[in-house]
Amino acid sequence: MHIPDNYLSPETCIAMTAAMVPVWAVSIKKVKDALPKDKIPKMGVGGSFSFLGMMFNVPLPGGTTGHAVGGTLIALLLGPWAACIAVSMALLLQALIFGDGGILAFGANCFNMAFVLPFVGYAVTHLIAPKFGTEESTKKRDLIAAGVGSYCGLNAAALCAAIEFGIQPMLFTDAAGNALYCPYGLGVAIPAMMIGHLTLFGLVEVIFTCAILAFVRSAAPEMQLSHKESHTSMPLKVFLGALILATPLGLLATGTAWGEWGTDEIADTGIGYTPQGMLDGFQFEAIIPDYSVAGMPEWIGYILSAVIGAACMVILFKLVSLLKKGGSAA
């Protein structure tokens, strides 16, 4: 679901970024006003969950891949505004350091995965939670609601990405009528994106969300906004370390996610040409492209990338907590 650079026109990228600016501004204000200082470092842990979840690529028959995002998970633990910031920072790290998602398309990726996904997931979860079970089955009820919410959130985000892809050939063409950017119209983009997300990838998001939510509630309740404890427990640290060590499982998935092909691949997808806007578009060299380190086995580079990403998230929000007045940082 990470939109690369040059799949969307510069105009679309500017519009999507402009749409995100007030969302980021309100999110920062909401977190500043409502989130205790001791809970801000937990945004780094939540962002690490999202960053690592996006490294576990899952294959779909036909050669495409997808992954969980974890936006609903963070929203249920710390609130949707905190989730927006945490996922945005995870996406920023992925784009700048690992080349996963575009720099110009950052606003669009954040709109889909850091705004639509957690807010839809959070809203759906709280809408249906009271309708499941009785007071005696609250935990089971909440997990069912979280699963449904995370599924809806992921698919809402995928639909937004599909529409952003699909409108490009309608709006931006060259003199010959060829698409300048993403060449797939709505009739192709929506089914191509939604089939995978409505089936396998949505299920992956449900499992990821419910498994971590159940773990947190039983072994690391300090991750929850409603819990007074702020110290990061050993079980949470061990769990995060286990996720990092397990990330090479994402390498087992072959192929590239739909809509993330490079210019050397897109002409081979059946359209017969490479859009000129892609050929002449913005280029950015990431520090550790594709989570691989030159001279290292692929799986070691993947683990190192996971360590760097998770560490950056934790350190960043720890530093942010130190800047907020009142309370003590965890």
Image (cartoon, rainbow, N blue to C red):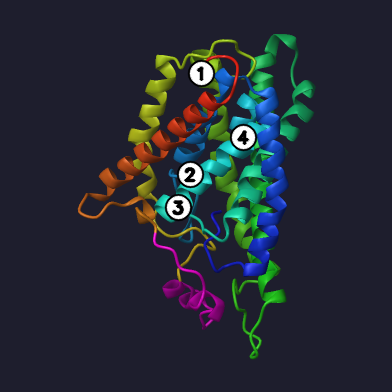
In which quarter of the view is residue 195 placed? Answer: bottom right
Percent coordinates x, y for residue 97 in the rendering:
41, 51
Mark 2 and mark 1: Cα distance apart in space = 28 Å
Label 4: which residue? 83
Q: Amino acid at mark 3?
A: Leu
**Residue 165: percent from left, percent from top:** 64, 65
Q: Is residue 277 magenta?
A: yes
Residue 96: mark: 3
Name the amino acid type tagged 1.
Ala
What secondary structure is found at the residue carrying circle 3?
helix
Dots 2, 3 in contact, CB < 8 A:
no
For the point 60% across and 21% down, the residue is 325
- Secondary structure beneath dot 1 equals loop
**Inter-mark Cα distance, 3 to 4:** 20 Å
User: Is residue 47 depicted above or below 201 in this figure?
Assistant: above
Q: Position of residue 251 (x, y in %)?
A: 35, 49
Which is more toward the observer, 57 or 9? 9
| Residue underneath mark 1 | 329
- Tag nearer the camera, 1 or 4: 1
Tag 1 or tag 3, which sits nearer the N-term?
3
The amino acid at mark 4 is Ala
Gap in angstroms between the C-alphas marked 1 and 4: 19 Å
Q: Magenta segment, which residues?
A: 263-285
